[in-house]
Image: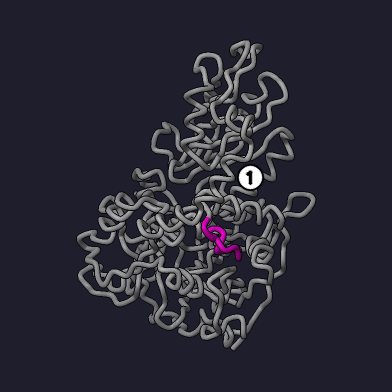
């Protein structure tokens, strides 16, 4: 067996991780996994448990969960279902090989962002590393191979998360497509279980997967060959779940850059597609271009996404998987879905090129639709101008809040304090009446479109209808007289504070 894929080879609890299993071992070693012996998902016990856990502990404290045994469709299944794998801030630095230490939660995330910024080239582009192909004998995802009548995806715990969903869903699968002109695309789309050998596939219009499939359809091809990859390591999964790649870029090549080594791929059984080798399961198939209904499904906003009268589906041609595979369910709209530092830093690098006065950008996924942007304002009206461009080009940024560089973008309380103390609604607001938006936004009257707002919570200059002299902040006055006092107190009482946190965690 290839040494990189050897499941028995020890690994540090720091990433990058070679597989989902190595990642889970690292979390368990750090006491970040809660095991639940069994849940009856026919009664939606797993869903109720996740709501309770997140409401009780919050995103930043709740552990990853392993449901060891799940009842589904009247049968008890012994295949474990994993949840909340990326909720805590410390998972971001861990995945990229950074020890979180005793940092505050947001400081952990900022450490991951700072590390990623060092990986970007001078042109602000991620390094791309060509994948390495391995044989089926060296691919963990080929330990079990099923074809034809052997295939029955109903036997796996692809659970129905919500009573309003159209059925069981794969909601953490990286869908792999190839186009002779554009190359490979890896994207994460909701996939409805429709039968033993049929799966719905839902790329939204203008997502890369949609573009790939519609281009093939328009060329008159009878179907597209596809593969759904399940249980990838955190970085490969994040590449398929976020906009880190431009159309035509290969997410697996970018993942290799983040991992610091090539992604190992293996040829599918029923097509020439190459997929990550060190994953839990690969479902191969063909996507014809005669559409059929799909949905509804509970989406990321926490609201039920509409049923679609026409959508793609895939006929399954093969299933390969590890022995005793792990299954990950994203309780969509409840927990945080994937590592977001690569997505955030990609946006930062792109917008900083466009706007030299921009300091940074953050979109907190626990409050979808919001986007915080920090700038060093150089001229009157600049904050509104930058915010308008961002909200029109970044679909998730429906509510853009512009703040000064002294505001911590990763501290929601800091941002809201700036809104309350520096923003005048009438003079410092712009509403864009129509722009492209997120497909799952429940408030949109036309799917994929809606209005946007830019809130300028920077200190308003007199020419922006602000006060002639802006009051100084209390903290600012303290540091002007005693510039080291906060750091000195932090050093003097660090051990006492750390001991208290451990005793009261």
Residue 293 shows in this picture: no
Q: Does residue 169 lie above or below 459 as drawn?
A: below
Q: Which residues are magenta?
A: 92-102
Q: Does residue 14 lie above or below 204 as drawn?
A: below
Q: Quadrant of the N terminus?
A: bottom right
Image-quadrant location for residue 217? bottom right
Q: Does residue 484 lie above or below 251 as drawn?
A: above
Q: Does residue 385 lie above or below 486 as drawn?
A: above
Q: Residue at x 78, y 49 (%)?
A: 123
Spot occupied by residue 322 in the image (x, y as percentages of width and height): 46, 80
Of residues 326 and 103, which is closer to you in this image?
Answer: 103
Q: Residue at x 55, y 14 (%)?
A: 427
Q: Secondary structure at mark 1?
A: helix
Spot occupied by residue 281 in the image (x, y as percentages of width and height): 47, 74
Q: Is residue 481 left or right of residue 167?
A: right
How packed is label 1: few (under 14 Cα within 10 Å), some, or many (20 or more)?
A: some
Spot occupied by residue 288 in the image (x, y as percentages of width and height): 50, 61
The residue labelled by disc 1 is 347
């Amino acid at each position: 067996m290839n040494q990189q894929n050897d499941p028995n080879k020890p690994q540090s609890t720091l990433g990058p991780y070679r597989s989902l299993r190595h990642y889970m071992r690292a979390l368990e070693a750090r006491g970040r996994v809660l095991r639940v012996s069994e849940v009856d998902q026919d009664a939606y016990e797993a869903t109720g448990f996740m709501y309770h856990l997140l409401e009780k502990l919050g995103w930043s404290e709740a552990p990853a969960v392993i449901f060891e045994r799940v009842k589904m469709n009247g049968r008890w299944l012994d295949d474990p279902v994993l949840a909340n794998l990326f909720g805590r801030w410390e998972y971001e630095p861990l995945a990229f090989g950074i020890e979180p230490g005793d940092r505050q939660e947001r400081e952990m995330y900022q450490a991951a962002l700072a590390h990623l910024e060092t990986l970007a080239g001078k042109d602000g582009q991620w390094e791309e590393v060509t994948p390495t192909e391995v044989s089926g004998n060296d691919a963990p995802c080929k330990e079990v191979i099923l074809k034809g009548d052997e295939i029955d995806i109903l036997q796996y715990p692809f659970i129905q998360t919500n009573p309003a969903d159209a059925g069981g869903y794969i909601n953490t699968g990286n869908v792999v497509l190839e186009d002779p002109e554009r190359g490979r695309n890896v994207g994460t789309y909701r996939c409805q279980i429709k039968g033993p050998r049929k799966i719905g596939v839902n790329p939204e219009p203008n997502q890369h997967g949609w573009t790939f499939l519609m281009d093939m359809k328009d060329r008159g091809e009878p179907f597209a060959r596809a593969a759904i990859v399940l249980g990838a390591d955190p970085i490969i999964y994040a590449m398929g779940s976020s906009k880190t790649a431009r159309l035509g870029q290969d997410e697996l090549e970018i993942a290799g850059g983040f991992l610091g080594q090539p992604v190992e791929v293996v040829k599918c059984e029923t097509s020439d597609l190459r997929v990550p080798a060190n994953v839990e399961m690969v479902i191969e198939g063909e996507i014809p271009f005669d559409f059929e209904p799909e949905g509804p499904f509970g989406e990321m906003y926490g609201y039920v996404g509409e049923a679609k009268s026409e959508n793609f589906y895939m006929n399954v041609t093969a299933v390969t998987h590890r022995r005793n595979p792990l299954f990950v369910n994203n309780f969509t709209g409840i927990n945080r879905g994937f590592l977001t530092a690569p997505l955030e830093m990609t946006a930062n690098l792109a917008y900083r090129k466009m706007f030299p006065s921009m300091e940074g950008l953050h979109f907190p996924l626990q409050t979808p639709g919001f986007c915080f942007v920090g700038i060093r304002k150089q001229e009157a009206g600049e904050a509104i101008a930058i915010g308008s461009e961002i909200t029109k080009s970044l679909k998730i940024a429906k509510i853009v809040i512009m703040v000064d560089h002294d505001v911590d973008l990763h501290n929601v309380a800091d941002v809201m304090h700036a809104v309350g103390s520096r923003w005048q609604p009438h003079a410092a607001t712009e509403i864009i009446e129509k722009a492209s938006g997120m497909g799952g936004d429940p408030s949109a009257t036309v799917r994929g479109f809606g209005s946007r707002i830019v809130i300028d919570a920077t200190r308003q200059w007199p020419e922006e209808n602000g006060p002639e002299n802006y009051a100084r902040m209390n903290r600012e006055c303290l540091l002007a007289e005693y510039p080291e006092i906060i750091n000195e107190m932090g050093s003097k009482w660090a051990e006492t504070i750390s001991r208290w946190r451990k005793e009261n965690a």
